[in-house]
Image (spheres, grey):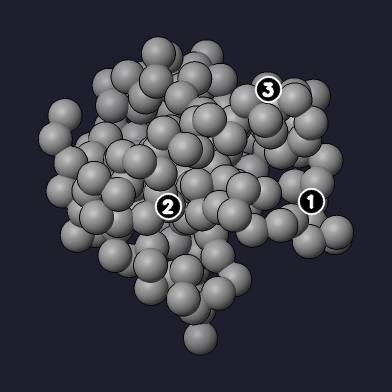
Amino acid sequence: MWKYIDLYYQHRIDTTLPIEDTIGELKKLVEEGKIRYIGMSEANPDTIRRAHAVHPITAVQMEWSLWSRDIEEEIVPLCRELGIGIVSYGAVGHGFFAGKAIVETLPPDSSLISHPRFVGENLEKNKSIYTRVEKLAKKHKCTPAQLALAWLFKQGDDVVPIPGTTKIKNLDSNIGSLAVKLTK
């Protein structure tokens, strides 16, 4: 039986409340032994810094991949300065680097059907990115998804990708990304 939650995330920042109040309440749960660590998702640098001043933040979850790198300028250095781990979702570009919409058709009920990166002109432009990554993956004797994950693993020991999959064969393939050796 569970006695506590290891890592409790605030998945969306409630902008109607000061972050200090939210983290203050979570700090009480830590002190009561109900949770061990506090994490945040989709927070900006100011919010992370203010939250961390109330109680140490253990992990910040943000989209980070070969495709989405806008956290590198501010969020990554801030997390490293404060000793906060980085959990990257969208690690294989929401399936893009696994071939979704490129070598594999999107199912009609997929949420990606309306994702801006997977439609119309954007998809056509992004196909050239996939082709470049696919060529580089072949050079490293891996799949594009493995290359995308290996790149994230190369970003530091403080980075934990969430590749996300519903298929065992993809899970096995994702594990294979740990064997891909990349240089800087």
Q: CA distance from mark 2 to mark 1?
A: 19 Å
User: Crowdedness of circle 1 by 10 Å Cα count: few (<14), some, many (20+)?
Assistant: few
Which residue in the structure is indicated by mark 2?
145
Vertical relation: 49 (above or below) 148: above
- Asked if marks 3 and 2 touch (Cβ < 8 Å), the reply is no
Going by the image, does 62 lie left or right of 72? right
Residue 148 shows in the view:
no
Residue wearing tag 3: 18
Asked whether disc 2 touches disc 1, contact meaning CB atoms under 8 Å apart, the reply is: no
Residue type, numbered disc 3: Pro
Depicted 175 relative to depicted 32: above or below: below
Tag nearer the camera, 3 or 2:
2
Query: Within 10 angstroms of label 2, few (less than 14), some, or many (20 or more) residues?
Result: many
Residue plotted at (49% across, 78% down):
168
**Labels 3, 1: front one:** 1
Mark drawn on residue 180: none
User: Mark 2 or 1, which is nearer the eye?
Assistant: 2
- Pointer 3 or 1: first along the chain: 3
Residue 178 drawn above or below residue 2 = above
- Whole-angstrom CA distance, mark 3 to mark 1, is 32 Å
Q: Is residue 141 visible?
A: yes
User: In terms of image quadrants, where is residue 52?
Assistant: top left
Where is 163 relative to 14, above or below? below
Residue 141 percent coordinates (x, y):
24, 55
Disc 3 is placed on an element classified as loop
Q: Which residue is mark 1?
A: 111
Q: Nearer the viewer, residue 36 or 173?
A: 173
- Circle 3/circle 1 CB separation < 8 Å: no
Q: Residue at x 71, y 57 (%)?
A: 105
Q: Amino acid at mark 1?
A: Ser
- How busy is the neighbourhood of tag 3: few (under 14 within 10 Å), some, or many (20 plus)? some
Q: Position of residue 90 (x, y in %)?
A: 54, 44
